[in-house]
Image (cartoon, rainbow, N blue to C red):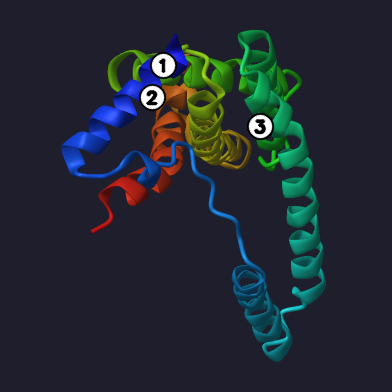
Amino acid sequence: AEQGERVTELGFLALSSGMSDNEIEPHAVADLSLLSLSVAVSLVLVVALVSVKLRLRLSTLIGIATLRTVLQLLALGALLYPIFAHNEWYVVLPYIALMVCFAAREASVKPKYFYTSIGLHFAVALGGAVSISFALCASLILVPHPWWDAQYMIPISGMLLGNSLTALSLGTDGYLKSLKEGATHECLLACGASRWEAVLPACQGALMTGLTPTLNSVCRP
């Protein structure tokens, strides 16, 4: 029934735009040619050559990162194909949970200082942020059918996790560094300030640091 509704919708769009049925290709995927891949690799080679020319000692790291990216994309494609093929909630949601766990682990190792439960706190923060953001987006903007549609949920959750991971790791790093290396909160406590008043400057700095990348991407001309 859903496929029939989709075909009907595509046919209506075709009639309204003057296109024939043969010209409509739902969910068409563009194959990357060898030339396109060569152009992408050439950009990496340019960065590696600049690194060698300026003696940055990053050429080995660039090569390892490039190889790791290719292997990760191949593995990701092999993993996502059956998920998109089945498109069931008991397949999509565990994959999203796995994404949250990997993102929490990646974010927890970035700060210079850490504490015992930082990984768990990051997992709860990232999971809550993705759940609330996707719920609002799915209910008010995209309205996918079904709501767990992998075509929408996995890419959007990935983008949300990427932005949240950057903000969370930068903000937490700034906050812990301010408490560990700074003396402002100790001076405020010595002057009779409460715990909240003592850590407020560190919280303000952490929020500004964490939100800056997102604000720059949103507010760029």
Circle 2 sits on which residue?
A: 7
Mark 2, Cα crowd under 10 Å, few <14 / some 14-19 / many 20+, is some
What is the distance, in whole Å, between disc 2 and disc 1 at their CAs?
Answer: 5 Å
Q: Is 17 displayed left or right of 217 in the figure?
A: left
For marks 2 and 3, give the CA distance: 38 Å
Looking at the picture, does residue 205 appear above or below residue 34?
above
The amino acid at mark 2 is Val
Q: Quick one: 140 or 91, which is closer to the camera?
A: 91
In this rendered view, identify the residue nearer to me: 151 or 9. 9
* Residue in front for this viewpoint, 104 or 183: 104
Residue pointed to by mark 3: 103
Residue for badge 1: 4
What residue is shown at x 65% (from left), y 85% (from top)?
Answer: 50
Along the line of sight, the residue nearer the viewer: 34 or 15? 15
Dot 2 and dot 1 residues touching (CB under 8 Å): yes
Q: Residues within 10 Å of mark 3 (few under 14, many from 20)?
A: many
Query: How far apart are the alpha carbons under marks 3 and 1?
Result: 38 Å
